[in-house]
């Protein structure tokens, strides 16, 4: 069946603060992708201490779908497979992501085009998948036909008296300080030393499309340095970004984000985490690209995770926006981006310097000019 082509719109007229692409800049989409994925499915990590990981996961608001001595599956309240799979290992490590194909036929098509074998996934998850590796070395599964965990009760949003509308009469707002119940996995953010090559691979292989590009201050002519990438589901709106990809001195995980019901759930859930001694990295605020309300936390192993609510959704008609990549441009309101969030804290300094020196010696896109641009981000 021929794919219906929907006329594209200027995504920045009355919508974004910055204009769209200039002549000759990256289009943000592939002309003939191998398949078009429907969503992100789950993330995989190894952890040395699953009991400690579970304690944080419960405080953060995950449900437990499976627990055994070697594996822990975390779920949200929406129906579907688990959104995080933790396996026992000698050290904390991001072990890859899984993307959900539209159907099993797309998994077979991808296997045929790439030469990768079709894998039957463990029975506890079900379905089939293809295991690939992106150009930066991140393992990427593409899956379909998984068992669907039944939906669980959601944390209901508070009834709000907003503007001139009155919806709450003879009643108060008293959100309890309990974990903010995670509804689902929203997105993952990765860093790459070969950013453009990796970006093009996701667009060409999975039919993903760019919602917004960021460029280093004063370096727009060098091309983008970060992209927020969504799934192309035609006229069906999808999250502003399912994957975000940034140029940097190391190929690594940056953070992952999990949706909660509303601002009250996010804020009260943050108080619950703080009372239990967990570290807030940055928040609460509202982003610009994607518009999400956000609150970032460090898990006990130092990995960054985000609660978010009220994010943008786009269909496939919107073209990407372009904006400078600055620390002050990461939020519409909220506290300034912290050194911890920007990986500029003393805790991260030695690792960052080592990564930068290694990247500058390597054959990649991270040269001295790009290092200068990256250093300007935190100061701008």
Image (cartoon, rainbow, N blue to C red):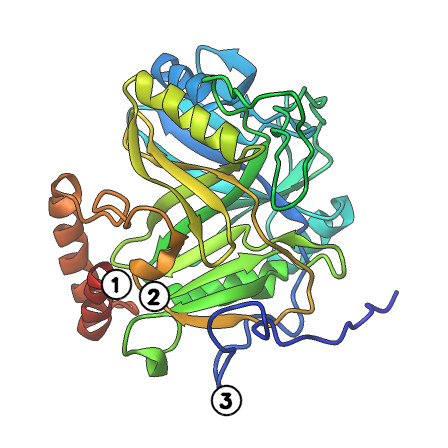
Could you tell me which quadrant the N terminus lies in?
Answer: bottom right
Considering every residue shown, the one lying at the far bottom of the view is: 23
Give the mark nearer the N terminus: 2 vs 3.
3
Residue appearing at x 27%, y 78% in the figure: 218
**Nearer the observer, disc 1 or disc 3?**
1
Residue 4 shown left or right of residue 170 in the figure? right
CA gap, disc 1 to disc 3?
25 Å
Instruction: Name the residue carrying label 3.
Output: 23
271, 371: nearer the viewer: 271
197, 174: nearer the viewer: 174
Q: Quadrant of residue 30?
A: bottom right
Is 132 placed above or below 96 here?
below
Q: How many marks?
A: 3
Instruction: Name the residue carrying label 1.
Output: 377
Could you tell me which quadrant the C terminus lies in?
Answer: bottom left
Residue 113: give x, y in percent of width and height: 65, 60
Residue appearing at x 74%, y 61% in the figure: 234
CA gap, disc 2 to disc 1?
6 Å
Instruction: Name the residue carrying label 2.
Output: 325
Give the mark nearer the N terminus: 2 vs 1.
2
Is 51 placed above or below 369 here?
above
Residue 131 shown left or right of residue 101 in the figure? left
Q: Are marks 2 and 1 in contact (CB under 8 Å)?
A: yes
Residue 145: give x, y in percent of width and height: 73, 35
CA gap, disc 2 to disc 3?
20 Å
- Mark 3: few, some, or many residues within 10 Å (few <14, many ≥20)? few
Residue 80: give x, y in percent of width and height: 68, 30
Is 192 placed above or below 337 here?
below
| Element type at mark 2 | loop
- Mark 1: few, some, or many residues within 10 Å (few <14, many ≥20)? some
Q: Are marks 1 and 3 in contact (CB under 8 Å)?
A: no
223, 288: nearer the viewer: 288
């Amino acid at each position: 069946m021929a794919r219906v082509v929907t006329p594209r719109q200027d995504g920045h007229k009355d919508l974004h603060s910055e204009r769209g692409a200039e002549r000759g800049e990256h289009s943000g989409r592939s002309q003939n992708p191998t398949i078009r994925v429907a969503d992100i499915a789950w993330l995989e990590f190894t952890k040395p201490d699953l009991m400690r990981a579970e304690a944080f996961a419960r405080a953060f608001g995950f449900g437990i779908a499976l627990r055994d001595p070697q594996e822990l599956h975390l779920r949200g309240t929406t129906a579907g497979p688990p959104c995080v799979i933790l396996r026992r290992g000698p050290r904390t490590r991001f072990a890859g992501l899984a993307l959900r194909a539209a159907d099993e036929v797309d998994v077979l098509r991808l296997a045929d085009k790439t030469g990768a074998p079709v894998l039957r996934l463990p029975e506890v998850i079900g379905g089939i998948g293809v295991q690939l590796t992106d150009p930066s070395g991140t393992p990427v599964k593409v899956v379909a036909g998984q068992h669907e965990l039944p939906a669980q009760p959601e944390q209901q949003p508070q009834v709000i008296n907003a503007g001139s509308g009155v919806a709450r009469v003879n009643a108060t707002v008293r959100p309890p300080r309990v974990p903010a119940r995670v509804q689902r996995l929203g997105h993952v953010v990765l860093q790459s030393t070969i950013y453009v090559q990796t970006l093009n691979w996701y667009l060409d292989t999975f039919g993903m499309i760019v919602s917004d590009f960021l460029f280093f201050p004063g370096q727009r002519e060098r091309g983008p340095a970060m992209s927020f990438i969504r799934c192309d589901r035609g006229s069906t709106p999808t999250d502003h970004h399912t994957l975000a990809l940034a140029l940097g001195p190391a190929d690594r995980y940056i953070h992952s984000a999990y949706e909660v019901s509303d601002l009250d759930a996010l804020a009260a859930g943050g108080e619950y985490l703080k009372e239990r001694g967990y570290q807030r990295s940055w928040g609460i605020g509202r982003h610009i690209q994607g518009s999400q309300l956000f609150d970032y936390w460090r898990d006990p192993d130092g990995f960054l995770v985000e609660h978010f609510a009220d994010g943008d959704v786009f269909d496939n008609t919107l073209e990407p926006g372009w904006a400078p990549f600055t620390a002050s441009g990461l939020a519409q309101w909220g506290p300034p981006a912290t050194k911890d969030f920007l990986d500029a804290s003393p805790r991260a300094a030695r690792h960052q310097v080592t990564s930068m020196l290694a990247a500058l010696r390597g054959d990649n896109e991270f040269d001295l000019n790009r290092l200068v641009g990256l250093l300007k981000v935190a100061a701008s």
